[in-house]
């Protein structure tokens, strides 16, 4: 637990990407009208979840008015509504909703990280920014006994594959990302893919509750 907390402290204090630091702070100052009374987090968002997790979820980046506001991954936006509802159904969360960092939500055998820990402009970090954030993903994996890695979106998929190759867990041809994609890694580890529960995907029906639930049932089965 101490090492987990120390890693999160390193993430929060990171200043490697001036563009992202400036953007997070700018959003926190200007705010969104609906959250005018909020004291925004406005800095890199740490990992969240069980430090003994066997399931690691790898997202894209904090939402400007979601995690960048609340200070907790996927908390306070519609993506989190979808994610935590599915996690609760699969037994990975103690409640199906998430609004603030102090709302009592706890993850069980599951942790959440991101390819980029700062909210980027237009939700698009640069390749260099993801590269500079990658050591945090490496350290997160080092600390967890994770056996299943679930990438939410193509950027998370690429980040996890890059790390799997670096560790020698995957040596074959680059597997194609897709919802429900499944790759067996070395030593009985697995990489799963899911469409990101963004409004762009959920509002259009590209991602449905049933589709997301199916991925977490698969994750649960592979862990067992």
Image (spheres, helix red, strand yellow):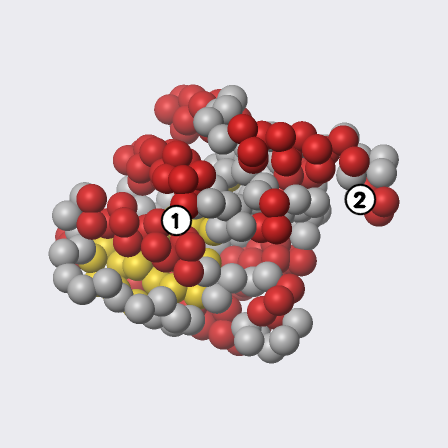
Q: Position of residue 169 (x, y in %)?
A: 17, 51
* In the depicted structure, whether residue 175 falls above or below residue 223: below
Give the residue displayed 66% in from the left and 72% down from the top: 203
Locate residue 171 relative to residue 197 in the image: left or right.
left
Up/down of 113 relative to 92, above or below: above
Query: Is residue 196 at least partly visible in the picture?
Result: yes
Q: Residue 134: horizontal and vertical position, in percent?
A: 36, 38
Residue behind mark 2: 32
Q: Label 2 crowding class (10 Å Cα cut-off): few <14, some 14-19, many 20+?
A: some
Q: Residue at x 79, y 36 (%)?
A: 30
Q: Earlier in the sequence, mark 1 or mark 2?
A: 2
Gap in angstroms between the C-alphas marked 1 and 2: 31 Å
Regarding mark 1 in the picture, which secondary structure is present there?
strand
Where, by quadrant of the figure, is residue 157 drawn?
Answer: bottom left
Location of mark 1 (residue): 56
The quadrant holding residue 51 is top left
Query: Quadrant of the rendered structure where residue 121 is?
Result: top right
The residue at the point 39 percent across, 34 percent down is: 132
| Residue at screen point 62% across, 30% down | 22
**Mark 1 or 2, which is nearer the eye?**
2
Pointer 1 local density, CA inside 10 Å: few below 14, some 14–19, many at least 20: many
For this view, does 161 lie left or right of residue 211?
left
Q: Position of residue 18 (x, y in %)?
A: 54, 28
Q: Which quarter of the rendering shows the C terminus?
A: bottom left
Q: Secondary structure at mark 2?
A: loop
Is residue 137 toward the left or the right of residue 195 in the image? left
In the drawing, what numbered circle is on residue 71?
none
Q: Nearer the viewer, residue 154 or 223?
A: 154
Relative side of 215 to 37, left or right: left
């Amino acid at each position: 637990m101490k090492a987990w907390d120390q890693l999160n402290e390193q993430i929060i204090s990171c200043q490697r990407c001036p563009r992202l630091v400036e953007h997070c702070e700018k959003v926190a100052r200007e705010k969104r009208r609906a959250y005018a009374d909020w004291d925004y987090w406005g800095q890199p968002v740490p990992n969240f979840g069980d430090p003994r997790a066997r399931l690691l979820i790898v997202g894209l980046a904090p939402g400007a008015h979601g995690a960048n506001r609340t200070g907790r991954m996927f908390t306070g936006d519609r993506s989190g509504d979808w994610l935590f509802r599915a996690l609760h159904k699969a037994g990975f969360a103690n409640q199906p909703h998430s609004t603030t960092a102090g709302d009592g939500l706890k993850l069980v055998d599951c942790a959440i990280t991101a390819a980029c820990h700062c909210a980027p402009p237009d939700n698009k970090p640069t390749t260099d920014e993801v590269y500079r954030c990658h050591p945090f993903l490496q350290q997160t994996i080092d600390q967890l006994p994770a056996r299943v890695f679930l990438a939410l979106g193509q950027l998370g998929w690429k980040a996890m594959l890059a790390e799997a190759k670096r560790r020698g867990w995957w040596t074959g041809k680059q597997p194609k990302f897709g919802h429900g994609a499944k790759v067996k890694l070395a030593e009985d580890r697995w990489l799963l893919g899911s469409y990101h529960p963004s409004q762009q995907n959920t509002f259009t029906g590209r991602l449905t509750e049933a589709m997301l639930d199916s991925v977490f049932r698969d994750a649960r089965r592979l862990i067992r």
